[in-house]
Image (cartoon, rainbow, N blue to C red):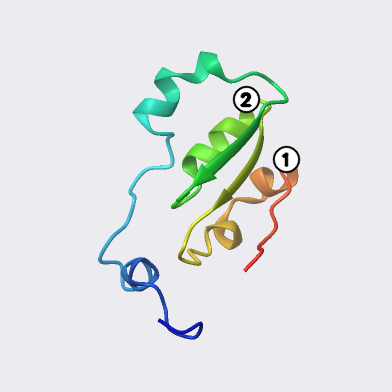
Amino acid sequence: MNIKQKHPWENAYIENTFKISTNQPSVIVKKHKERFSKGDNVLDVGCGNGRNAIYLASLGCFVDCFDVADLKWVDELEKDIKDKYVFKKII
């Protein structure tokens, strides 16, 4: 796959053939939330729509997250969330 080709996941999101229909964090992340403390550094690999990253940031964690597909979810965040956290696209 060359750099200009879209990753299959990105195509699935763009074409709406795959969509996460919730903004709630995953059951696993919520179940283990006591393991995270304010100021912890967290890496969310394969962040999808960002639901776990945003939740962990709301707990006071410093979260770096990425996905192989440019899902453009940062562009679609509500203003109040954008005002609370720093989002940077690196790709």
Image location (x, y in percent) of residue 84: 73, 40
Instruction: Identify the residue under disc 1.
Output: 84
Give the residue type at disc 2.
Leu
Mark 1 surroundings within 10 Å by alpha-carbon count, few (fewer than 14), some (14 through 19), many (20 or more): few
Q: Residues within 10 Å of mark 2 (few under 14, many from 20)?
A: some
Query: Residue lying farthest top?
Result: 34
Query: Going by the image, does 9 lie left or right of 74?
Result: left
Of the residues tagged 2 and 1, which is closer to the observer? 2
Q: Is mark 1 on a helix, strand or loop?
A: helix
Looking at the image, which is closer to me, 6 or 59? 6
The percent coordinates of residue 26 (x first, y second) are: 38, 33
Q: Which mark is residue 59?
A: 2
Q: Is residue 77 left or right of residue 25?
A: right
In space, the residues marked 2 and 1 are separated at their CA atoms by 12 Å
Q: In this view, does 12 lie to the left or right of 55?
A: left
Residue at (48%, 63%) from the top-left corner? 71
Q: Position of residue 42 (x, y in %)?
A: 60, 35
